[in-house]
Amino acid sequence: MARPGGLLLLLLAAAAAERCLPRAPCDACIRSHPECAWCEDPEFTAGGKAEEARCGSRVALEQAGCPHDAVVEPRGHVRVLEDVVLGPGGGGAQLGPRSLRIFLRPGEEQSFQVRFQRAEGHPVDLYYLMDLSYSMKDDLENVRKLGSDLLAALRNVTSSVRIGFGSFVDKTVLPYVSTVPSKLRNPCPERHEPCDPPAAFRHVLSLTANASEFASRVSQQRISGNLDSPEGGFDAIMQVAVCEERIGWRPVTRLLVFASDDTFHTAGDGKLGGIFIPSDSRCHLDASGVYSKSHLYDYPSVGHLAQVLSAANIQPIFAVTGPTVPVYQELSRLIPKSVVGELREDSSNVVQLISDAYNSLSSTVELQHSPLPPGVSLSYESHCGGPPGPPRPHGGLCSGVRVKQQVNFTVRVRADGCLAAPQAVALRVLGFAEELRLELRGLCACPCAPRQAPTPLCHGGSLECGVCRCPAGRRGRRCECEGAAEAPGDCRPPNSTGPPCGGRGRCVCGVCECPPGLSGPQCQCDSSACERHDGLPCGGPERGECVCGTCRCRDGFTGSACGCSLERAGCLHGERECGGHGRCVCGRCHCQPGYLGPLCTRCPSCQTRCQRHRDCADCRAFGLGPLRANCSLACNRTAVRVLRARPPRAEAAGWCTEQAADGRILVFDIEGQADEDEDGDVTLAVWVEEAAAAAEPVKLVAGLVAGIVAAGLLLAVLYRVSLEVYDRREYRRFEEERRRAKWNENNPLFKSATTTTVNPNFVQE
């Protein structure tokens, strides 16, 4: 029989063969499937196989006779170009490695590890972007005093902090703001109240570490106003993200605090003002810091804004008032690495809000990648200190990461097709400037042995990946034939006008070169037409081989698919075949009706040994039972030894105790017969006293049952009699009280309602 390891190998080879189809040349072979390999042994196709037969799985090729060293099977791999030590020992590096070169074979997956360690005191740039519409008037007073408090709060976690300031209202066209010249100069409701002209965005202060300068510039700001409720904050966020030089962003942690008390306009809303051109993601600040092209470009969409913020590595903090918190929470779900905090009506809690938001953002590690080339996919598995999270296609995520804690990510990359040129992909943790650079290269060519040209094996041709490349004027597998074409009668049966090789192969130098799966002088034999056993033709090479559509079985196997083993060792139970209750067919027991199990040793419906000998024990010892009329014939191989004395308890422990047809209990022992031997002579040792005394337990049980039933009936009768006596006594008492009752005639309630009237005219004197 086939060994389990060999059978598993054959199944794997069959599965791989179904995925890897024959192809030529070698480059096309390895591009077709990641399991495909190529045999470069020149003699591999000497038996008339087509060159396509060189393409297959490694297991299938080696089984077909290709030497192990001649199998060309390129595999992708990862090469580390630059790595760093994380933490203070590596100059404060937080992300490693820094550069990888990955060779990708089409359809094959490669994986690598990314490490991140949160550093202590990482520098921070914070830009405060404030809504200066009229409803934020009381907030501006508190923001003017914000600079020193905010810097002090952030310096508790890092020593390098810079802050900047900008404001926004809305586009300066109808219907967002009034275009009346006086309203453009002073949009406040009160004419004499000083207000600044509205602007889609006004950059006030570039990032600085000077708290007094922040306070001075912010104190010069005045409130403004507009007409509609939604504000133009998306325009302002876009300009803050793309105008990096004007804002002064450093390659450090970048925070954008967006403070507002209302919702926002988004892409498409510009049509109300006649603006149709989409946002161009460019910086349009004039010399005074005002967004000068707001009347030309529409508001950015949420997806566009999220993409720009992510590319600029900016983490937004939406500090908004209570009624608008749900709207901004939905917005935060669409913008990576953003948080929402509830701002009091007068912005008095803004410092605490920003501090809490910074702690939340800095403890969240989210690894993402730049846009991927077509056909390339990445997945991430996060290792945050506990069990690894499920694979995520868009990035790795760890929350609650502490300072100096290291987290790891397993990144898997796959290319569905062949990469024609090296491709660059960058990985980075959102909010941090460090990045990991990936150089992706396709593995699409066979690394065969160096080309040999010319070589005697190929009759002057060159040998490449085991295949001869013939010079002009020669042909054949080894370039052994002269001429450019075959003779008309080559590769045909005598007197045949059909196509060469039956139209199923290729005629090479007068010999048919058959494709994989076909063989024979005219490629007439189909090796895939043989019957299969366990999913393999002819049960696999260990059982037989397919010869022109018919299985030729090896020694020890038979059957049309060589699926029947002639080995009988697996059918023996002891020295008996199938326990004497079946026959061995193809190495397996076929049991008689009623018998079960691999060796036919179980019979749930059969009688036990004690049950089979019970009637013979009864008729031989006592002349009773169903066999008493034919006892000598039915029990001719049964001898009985009657015991007058009770056997010892220990000796009688394994004896048979069976109930006869009339309720008697028979106690006997079976001597001189093995468990499996049902037809041999047997001697029964029967205890004679048990049969006579056997009825006593039955009588005792029957008496107990009858006594219980009688007692129950008696109790029921007594209960019914006592109930009847009680009912009669009560009835007599009722009748006696009714007879003794007297009606009170003087009681007006019981007087007659009839009145007698006497006419005095008829009174008789």
Image: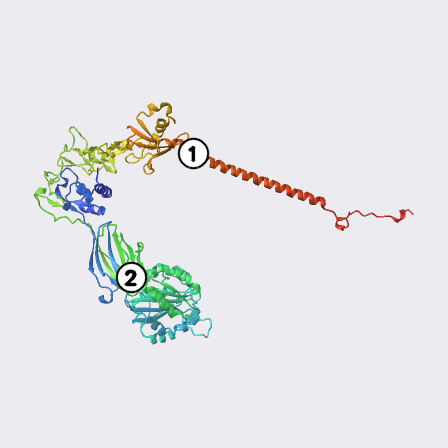
Q: Residue furthest right?
A: 765
> Which of marks 1 and 2 precedes in the sequence?
2
* Relative vertical location of residue 128 with respect to residue 736 in this rendering, above or below: below
- For disc 1, the neighbor class at 10 Å (few under 14, some 14 to 19, many from 20) is some
- For disc 2, the neighbor class at 10 Å (few under 14, some 14 to 19, many from 20) is many
Q: Quadrant of residue 509?
A: top left
Q: Quadrant of residue 178?
A: bottom left
Frontmost of labels 2 and 1 is 1
Query: Mark 1 highlights which residue?
Result: 696
> Tag 1's secondary structure?
helix
Residue type (three-letter) at the residue carrying disc 1: Glu
Query: Mark 2 highlights which residue?
Result: 429
> Tag 2's secondary structure?
strand
* Relative vertical location of residue 754 with respect to residue 431 in this rendering, above or below: above
Residue 120: x %, y % from top left? 28, 68
Q: Is residue 409 left or right of residue 475?
A: right
Q: Is residue 401 left or right of residue 739?
A: left
Please name whichever residue, 377 or 226, is drawn nearer the observer in this view of the structure: 377
Residue 612: x %, y % from top left? 34, 30
